[in-house]
Each structure stands twice: as C-alpha cells, then as structure tokens.
Amino acid sequence: MCVIGDFAWDVLIRTNRELLRGGDTFGEVMLTPGGSAANVAVWASRAGMATEFIGKIGRDHFGRLAQEDLDREHVVAHFVETEAHLTGSVAVFVDHTGERSMISGHGADFYLLPQDLPRDVIRRARHMHLTAWSFFIDPPRAAARSAAQLAQSSGATLSFDPGSFQMIGEMGVAQFLAVTQDLGIDILLPNKEEGSILTGGLDEPAEIAAGLADLFPTALIMLKLDADGALVWEHGVGTHIPAGTNNLVDATGAGDSFAGGFLAHYLEHGDAVAAARFATTISAWVIEHLGARPEPDAKLSASLQRR
C-alpha cells in the first residue's frame, strides 16, 4: 500500500479540567509525530501491511526526525525535501472530556507538486490511500489527484478519507465533490460529521451511508461513528459494528488508526465486516491513550498480530 499526503508534528495540549477564558490550569504538553496520511501509513504498517509513504518535509531538524520516525515504524518513506518551507506542524487541543480540535500550519506538506511525485513508486502500488488534507487547497491538490490517477491507471485501487467537516464546509461541498468524485474511489472512510455535510445534512447513519454511495457509486462506504462504533455499507447493505470502548481520553488520530487497521485487514482478506471489527479494536485502544499513535503495549500488539 502507498499513502500520499501530510507528515506533521503534533504539539498536543491536554487540559485536566475546563480551561476558562484568560485562565490557567495544569495538563500535558507533548510533541508527537502525526499528520493524517502518515498516521494511516504507520497503523497499516503496525498491522502488518507493507507500506510506503510519499510526502514533503523541510530540510530541517524536524524533517530528519520525520525520516527517523517512519524508518522506526517500518514505513518506506519517499520524502521530497525543501528549504523553502518548514516541516509541517499542528496544534492539537484536547479538552478535559477528550475531544480534540486542531489548527494546522502551512508546512512543507502543503507544497507537494506534481513534478515532485516519485512515479515509479506510484506505478507499482497495489493500493493508494489519500486524505482530504491534500485536497482542500492547491497545492497539494494537483499532486494528489495526479498520484491517484497514475495509481489507478496502473491497476491500483484507491481509498479516501474526507478528513474534516469544517474544512469541507469552508471549501464548499460542491467544490469538494468536484475534485474527488471523478477519481473512482474504491473505499470511502468518512466519519459521521463528514458524511452528514456531504449528503446535505442527513443524520441517520444508514441514510448517510446510502447517500454517500450515491455520490461515490464505486466505493465501499466505511462510516466511522465514534462512540457508536462504525457502519459498513456494501452493495446497499449496512452492518453495524459496536464500539470497542467509550473510555475517551484523547480522540486524536482515532480515525486514522481505524483507517490504517481497516485497510491492512481488508486489502489482505477482502472481508469488510471483519476488517471493521479489527479496526475498531485498534481505534478503541488509541482513544484510551494520548497522541495519534502511542507505542503499542502487549495487549494491542497481540491484537495487531491477529490480523
């Protein structure tokens, strides 16, 4: 599997209690590796999938750390380096309930260009995963679309995560659909909020999934429902997957871990329901820990090996 998109460092700030306007409180402040696309690549690799990553980083200290991070995670990285922009960074605020909000800076990952693409890497991929963070602005939209089209013309399947309901709204639903619907996406991995905004405000999961299937008729719909689990929508039939836990500590990266686990399982076995159950186990563990990809403990390692 090849993943294209963002690698960024998360500055994660978690409060232990409600932070009042102008107030002060104790909490945790951490620097952790992230970026939605890189997170998916790492979780797929942890689940046993041979994974490669394409992205852009600054020729700086954090760029070197990015390379070391993916090497350690057994992800083959094809980084384009630039001196014009710094390696990406994201401020992640996790409130006392575990819900997260993010502010993404415009780092090097937002300046990937079509001429930067390692075309031989893309041509040999069996599957390519993309996230909407590569589509909200251009660049890097043209590069992501070129990579998707090249991969598909070489026989690869495509998966896509719509990424952010707020960013879809700011971009405009019609424009978002205009740059994604023509790609022939095979697996769509939205959460409920993203699915709702794309389907004109539908609220019931089955209605959202059916609406998304109309918009993306070639796609398996894998609708993430947070505390309510997930819904697999395949050939007009929905299967609900219960949540693995509701013990929310930090929601950062939960959707990315689900996507990485789901793709690793599904691309090997072809069973979407079994893949969703496997992915739910991973994302349930992730939300009970801080950061997008904390180091697996013995319990999670055992689950990952059961793929």
Image (spheres, helix red, strand yellow):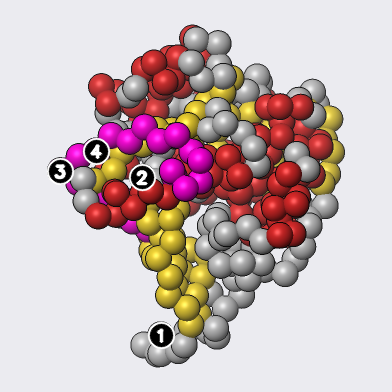
Labels 4 and 2: the sequence-earlier one:
2
In percent of width and height, residue 59 lies at 21, 45
What's the residue at 45%, 53% (across, down)?
34
The residue under the point 56% across, 67% down is 290
Instruction: Give amino acid for label 3.
Output: Ala
Rate crowding at label 2 as few (under 14), some (14 to 19) or many (20 or more) other CA atoms within 10 Å.
some
Q: Quadrant of residue 55?
A: top left
Q: Amino acid at mark 1?
A: Arg
Q: Earlier in the sequence, mark 2 or mark 3?
A: 2
* First in residue order: circle 3 vs circle 1: 1
Which residue position is annotated with label 2? 67
User: Which residue type carries mark 4?
Assistant: Glu
| For residue 152, above or below residue 202 | above
Is residue 240 on the magenta stretch? no
Whole-angstrom CA distance, mark 3 to mark 4, is 9 Å
* Residue 163 image point, x, y percent: 51, 44
Quote the CA–CA distance across marks 4 and 2: 11 Å
Between the C-alphas of marks 2 and 1, the distance is 38 Å
Q: Nearer the viewer, residue 95 or 304?
A: 304
- Tell me if I can see residue 249 in this picture: yes
Residue 276 vertical placement versus 283 (above, below): above
| Residue 45 falls left or right of residue 53 | right
- The residue where tag 3 is placed is 84
**Residue at the far left in the pictured view:** 84
Residue type at mark 2: give it. Answer: Gln
Disc 4 or disc 2, which is closer to the eye? 2
From which residue to which does the magenta span run?
A: 70-90
Q: Residues within 10 Å of mark 3 (few under 14, many from 20)?
A: few
